[in-house]
Amino acid sequence: MKNVIKLFFSIFLCSIFLTNAHSAGEKIDLLKTDWSFKGYLGKFDRGSLQRGYQVYTEVCASCHSMKYLSYRNLSEKGGPEFTEEQAKAIASNFEVTDGPNSDGEMFTRPAKLSDKFVMPYANVEEAKISNGGAYPPDMSVLVKARSGGADYIYSVLLGYEDPPEGMILDDGVYYNKYMYGNKIKMPKQLYEDLVTYNDGTPATPEQMAKDVVTFMAWSAEPHLEARHKIGFRALIYLIILTILVYFSMKKIWSRVESEV
């Protein structure tokens, strides 16, 4: 009986070792870029946020929603900081269903600052049917929801390659070096000069990926800059308090005669 238990225990340890070794061998380092919002004092690049919104609108919004954002957020401090008039003009380009009116009927009207971002599909089932059975995830908090965060989303957007020799993909499935399982139903989206940036920045795939991920990072954590400021002030306060306590204790103990 003891030999059987030892055998099973050995098999269990070997399986754990082989699994870990296999996982470590397949691990691929994510692409890195210089994120302005990283670090204790990180801030969002306003130009990148505005360009990121443009990429989202022109490339991503036809499939992916951002249901937690309102158009007024585009003009709030800490975000893209469009002017209020610019935000109103952006909102007016979209139509929302409202009502009922005095006749008891629903109607459409231009969106206002208080409205949420317009959804690309009426419901989940319509979204799946329109995308070959795959549901495009909401992008509002996607950066926080995915392991690897901004680096992971950035890598996936730039990770499309031809599949390795011998790998067969189903119709409508694409190979992505950084995607979990290396298979993704979303085709490659970012191509050279796909959008024309209003500020004249060259629209390379890398630049568009960085900008749209920056916008997504802000949407997932819109109060990041305020939090960083509070944290920095708290740190300064604690440092000053520590110094005052140190000198106070030193003065108090200086009055105590040491025993010989």
Image: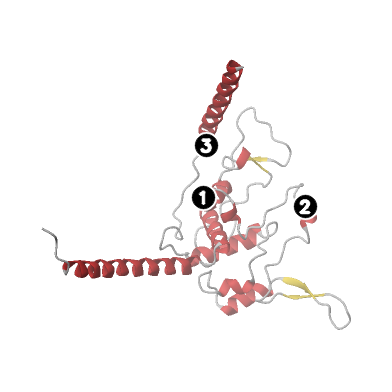
At which x and y percent is residue 5?
59, 21
Q: Which mark is residue 111?
A: none
Q: Which residue is found at the position 40% from the left and 63% from the top? A: 41
Check disc 3 and report its element: helix, strand or loop: loop
Q: Is residue 87 left or right of residue 248?
A: right
- Name the foreground residue: 49 vs 28: 28
Q: Is residue 13 above or below residue 256?
A: above
Closer to the N terminus: mark 3 or mark 1? 3
- Name the foreground residue: 193 vs 1: 1
Q: Amino acid at mark 1?
A: Asp
Q: Is residue 197 among the parts visible in the rendering? A: no
At which x and y percent is residue 78?
50, 70
Q: Badges 3 and 1: C-beta atoms under 8 Å apart?
A: no
Closer to the N terminus: mark 2 or mark 1? 2
Q: Residue furthest left?
A: 260
**Mark 1 Cα within 10 Å, few/some/many (few <14, many 20+)?**
some
Check disc 1 and report its element: helix, strand or loop: helix
Q: Which mark is residue 130?
A: 2
Specify the quadrant that holds the N terminus. Answer: top right
Q: Which residue is found at the position 66% from the left and 41% from the top? A: 174
Closer to the N terminus: mark 2 or mark 3? 3
- Name the foreground residue: 64 vs 17: 17
Colour setup of the view? secondary structure
Q: Which residue is mark 1?
A: 151
Q: Which residue is mark 3?
A: 27
Gap in Å between the C-alphas at discs 2 and 3?
Answer: 33 Å
**Mark 2 Cα within 10 Å, few/some/many (few <14, many 20+)?**
some
Gap in Å between the C-alphas at discs 2 and 1?
Answer: 28 Å
